[in-house]
Image (cartoon, rainbow, N blue to C red):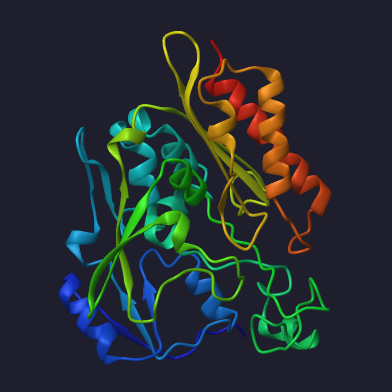
Amino acid sequence: MITMPSFRVLQPKTEAEAIEMLAAHDDVRILAGSTDIVINLRNKLLSPKYALDVTKIASMHGIDYSETEGLCIGAATTLSEIAENPTIRTRYEALAKAAGLVAGPNIRNMATLGGNICLDTRCQWYNQSYFWRKSCNFCLKKDGDICHVAPGGSYCWAAYSGDTAPALLALGASIKIVSALGERVVDLKDFFVLDGIKKYNLAPNEIVTEIHIPAKSANQRGFYKKLRIRDSVDYPLAGAAVVGRLDKQGRCTNAQVAITAVNPAPLIVKGVEELMVDREPSEELFEKVADMARKTAKPMKTSLSTMPYRRHMIGVFVKQGLSEIFAN
C-alpha cells in the first residue's frame, strides 16, 4: 500500500507569516499546487517534518503588466491563468505557449508558476516507488551512493524537466526570493545549478514569491515545443523555447534560445544573439543555431527515450521555432 509520510501542514496568510514559519521550523517543504510534490511524498522520495502551504497568500497570486516595468507574476499563480491571460498571450507569447503545454488542463488548474520553476529533477532510477528503488540498491540522489546513469562518477545526472523555465530564460526573467534576512532578486539564469541534487540556488528558509519579465522583452514572437511520450500528460524529454523579433528591414534585432529536459538544469544556448542580430534570417543561420543547441544539450539515460534522439529533437524544435518566428 502506498501512503504518504506524516507531516504537519503550516498555512500562512501573508508573506511575513510564511517567512516567520520558515525561520522557526527546520525540514520544511513548500506546497502550492502540489501536483508534483505529492507524488514524490507517496513514493517516499521526501519525508519532511512540515509542509508550508502558500496558496492562501494573496500577494503571491496575480498577474500585473506595465509598459515601463514589464510583467510581474505571483509565484502561486496557476499555469492555466498564465496560459489564458490575454496580455501574456499577446506580449510574452513563448511563456503562454509553454504554460499551456504543461500536462493537461486539470494539472494546469492546480500547478503554479513558482512550483514549475522549482520542479524537482527527474530520472528513471529516481522517480519510482520505494520498493522498486530498494530492489536496485537506491541511487545517488536518494538513499544510495551510486548514479545508475553514470556509475563511475559522483555526479547526479537527473534531468530538469520544467516547461516554463526555458521560455522565461529566453525572455530574460528574474525572480524575487524572500527570507528572514530580507529579499533578493536573482536572474533566472543564475538560479539554476547544473547538479541533479542541488538543482537551484535556494536556501531552506527562502521562498520564491514573484517572477519578473522586463518590458524590453515584450512583444516578441515566441515559440515552445517539447518531446513527450503521452502528448496530454507527460513531462518533456526534450524541449526548446525561442524568442525573437525583426526590424522593418527584415533584420534580426533579438534572438534567444533556451532548452530543457536534456541537462540537470534548463540552459540558455550561448552565442545565438551574437550570431543572428543585425543579419537577415536564413536557413543557413537556423542550422547553425540548431547545431549550437544540440551541442548544449547533454541528455543522459534518465528516461526511456534514447540520448541521440533527444538531442536530435532539440535541433528540430529550434529550427522550427526560428522558421516560425522569423518567417516574413
| Residue nearer the viewer, 132 or 308 | 308
Percent x, y for residue 223?
A: 52, 32
Question: Quadrant where the N terminus lies?
Answer: bottom right
* Image quadrant in which you'd find residue 15: bottom left
* Image quadrant in which you'd find residue 171: top left
> Can residue 229 be seen?
no
| Residue nearer the viewer, 230 or 289 | 289
Question: Is 254 on the left-hand or right-hand side of 24?
Answer: right
Q: How many numbered tags mark residues here?
A: 0
| Residue occupying image coordinates x 35% and y 37% | 84
Vertical position of residue 211 compared to residue 227: above or below? below
> Can residue 117 be seen?
yes
| Residue occupying image coordinates x 72% and y 28% | 287
Percent x, y for residue 3?
A: 54, 85
Percent x, y for residue 9?
A: 32, 83
Percent x, y for residue 233?
A: 59, 51
Question: Is 149 on the left-hand or right-hand side of 279?
Answer: right
| Residue occupying image coordinates x 60% and y 79% | 43
| Residue occupying image coordinates x 54% and y 75% | 198
| Residue nearer the viewer, 275 or 161 | 275
Vertical position of residue 258 compared to residue 19: above or below? above
Vertical position of residue 302 compared to residue 18: above or below? above
* Image quadrant in which you'd find residue 142: bottom right
Question: Is 276 on the left-hand or right-hand side of 123?
Answer: left
